[in-house]
Image (cartoon, helix red, strand yellow):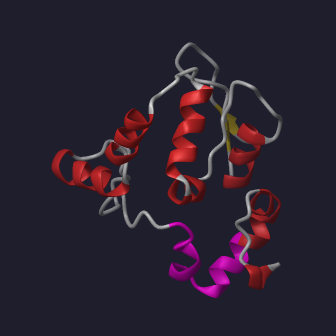
Amino acid sequence: KGACTIPSEKNVYEFMSSWSKHVESWTGKPNPRLLVLRYEDMLESPFKSFGAVAKFLGINAPRDRLDKAIKQSSFKVLKNQEKSKGFVERPAKAEAFFRKGEAGQWRHELTPEQVQRIVSDHREQMERFGYVPPEYK
């Protein structure tokens, strides 16, 4: 089975289960009220990504405002903020919430067996978003 959040003024329905089920619950059916962005795309094309967010929110942000937003939400800035002020979402056993800020670093941090298990368990969603490493296709 699984658990889910109860929709309210402060949250949307969210199915709680595996990573794949979580992703599927948010992205499985197109929804004009939902903008899906990959972290990798935000790193690669921050202006395009932030521009898409602004447009999605109905904001016609000038270039300088987007540039400022990109700088203020950079990994380096967020990591420094966590060091100085903490970060409420940091798991209790984790040294930090903001670790490296690199796309795809999991492929090098995990053992081949761990990657194989993740791909095996989550292939469908990983393929949808381009996360399956070439050697596991």
Which range of residues does the magenta coloring cover? 103-118
In this orientation, does residue 97 appear?
A: no
Residue 45 is left or right of residue 135, and the answer is left
Residue 55: percent from the left, percent from the top? 59, 28
The vertical placement of 2 against 46, above or below, is above
Q: Classify residue 108 by image quadrant.
A: bottom right
For the residue pair 65 and 96, the one nearer the viewer reads as 65
In the displayed structure, would residue 24 be above or below residue 116? above
Q: For this view, does 84 lie left or right of residue 137?
A: left
Residue drawn 69% across the image and 70% down it = 118
Asked whether, in this view, residue 41 is left or right of residue 29, the answer is: left
Q: Quadrant of the N terminus?
A: top right
Identify the residue at the far left of this view.
Answer: 84
Numbered-mark total: 0
Q: Position of residue 33 (x, y in %)?
A: 69, 24
Identity of the residue drawn at 66% across and 78% down: 115
Q: x, y (%) of residue 105?
A: 52, 73
Residue at x 31%, y 50% (from the top left corner): 78
